[in-house]
């Protein structure tokens, strides 16, 4: 499998959701889906800049508990989720219902996760020189689809619900707070090689549950 085919796998979740969402939700318009994907592509530009330049500062590269915690909560949590929320604000909302807007947000999160995986895989691909390296890359990519891309999706969903409620006169700030904290917690524990690594899975599951809770609350507030 060549590099381009491997990179293409990064977008399988986004493409699959794109197709299913359009089939299952007849009110969802393809132009809003495409716009969400475009916003995700633009989002990755400042995110990549921060990752390759800002995170190379000594405070982020130091291998200490404080440095890891600051990187996880400040960058992966507050800065990254704030940046994603800013771009989610550009997803059209006035002419959409909650289900279609939320579908666009989920698609946005999947696409951001896909582009981030592409950057991650290219970097790893350049590092691996041993035989069978590409098989290792595929394994890493599959792990990211069910971990890093998953946290992007659910945190984007929480930020999207925050924006939806805010624009409908309900100042529910907790969805965004959860997005910041859970993304930071996920990144903090995913760096462990011990049993603590599995706490990153707990963060993903908790984010998924909170997405469902806040979605239902938003739906009920409209009825």
Image (cartoon, rainbow, N blue to C red):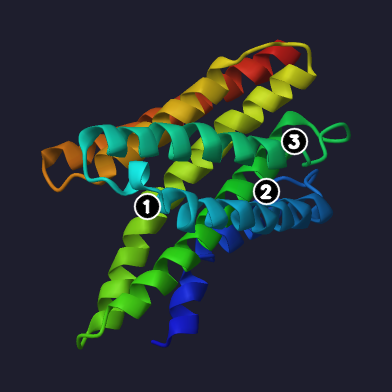
Q: Which of 27 and 80 lies nearest the eye of the viewer?
A: 80
Q: Tell me which residue sits at (40%, 49%) in the image.
A: 57
Q: Residue furthest right?
A: 95
Q: Left of 42 or right of it: where is 169?
A: right
Kindly check if marks 2 and 1 are in contact, taking CB atoms under 8 A apart as contact.
no
Relative to 200, 28 lies left or right? right
Q: Quadrant of the N terminus?
A: bottom left
Q: Is there CB contact under 8 Å for labels 1 and 3?
A: no
State whether residue 209 appears in this view: no
Q: Position of residue 203 (x, y in %)?
A: 34, 32
Q: Are marks 2 and 3 in contact (CB under 8 Å)?
A: no
Tell me how far mark 2 sits from mark 1, CA to CA.
23 Å
At x 20% / y 88%, what residue is drawn?
A: 131
Q: How many marks?
A: 3
State the separation of the CA atoms marked 1 and 3.
26 Å
> Mark 3 — residue?
89
Q: Which residue is mark 1?
A: 146
Q: Residues within 10 Å of mark 2 (few under 14, many from 20)?
A: few
Q: Nearer the viewer, residue 51 or 189?
A: 51
| Disc 1: CA contacts within 10 A as few (<14), some (14-19) or many (>=20) | few
Lower position in the chain sequence, tag 2 or tag 3: 2
Q: Is residue 74 left or right of residue 28?
A: left
The percent position of residue 11, horizontal first and vertical second, equals 54, 65
Nearer-N-terminus badge (2/1): 2
Tell me, for residue 24, which label it has, or none. 2
**Horizontal side, residue 133 vs residue 144: left or right:** left
Q: Quadrant of the C terminus?
A: top right
Helix, strand or loop at mark 1? loop
């Amino acid at each position: 499998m060549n590099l381009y085919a491997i990179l293409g796998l990064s977008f399988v979740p986004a493409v699959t959701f794109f197709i299913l969402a359009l089939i299952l939700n007849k009110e969802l318009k393809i132009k809003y889906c495409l716009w969400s994907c475009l916003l995700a592509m633009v989002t990755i530009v400042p995110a990549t800049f921060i990752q390759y330049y800002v995170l190379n500062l000594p405070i982020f590269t130091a291998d200490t508990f404080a440095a890891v915690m600051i990187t996880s909560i400040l960058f992966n949590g507050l800065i990254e989720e704030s940046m994603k929320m800013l771009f989610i604000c550009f997803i059209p909302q006035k002419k959409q219902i909650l289900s279609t807007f939320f579908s666009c947000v989920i698609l946005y999160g999947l696409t951001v996760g896909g582009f981030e995986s592409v950057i991650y895989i290219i970097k790893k691909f350049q590092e691996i020189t041993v035989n069978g390296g590409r098989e290792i890359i595929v394994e890493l990519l599959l792990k990211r689809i069910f971990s890093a891309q998953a946290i992007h999706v659910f945190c984007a969903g929480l930020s999207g619900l925050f924006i939806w409620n805010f624009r409908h006169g309900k100042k529910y700030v907790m969805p965004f707070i959860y997005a910041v904290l859970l993304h930071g917690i996920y990144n903090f524990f995913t760096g462990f090689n011990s049993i603590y690594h599995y706490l990153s899975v707990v963060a993903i599951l908790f984010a998924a549950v909170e997405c469902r809770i806040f979605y239902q609350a938003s739906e009920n507030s409209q009825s």
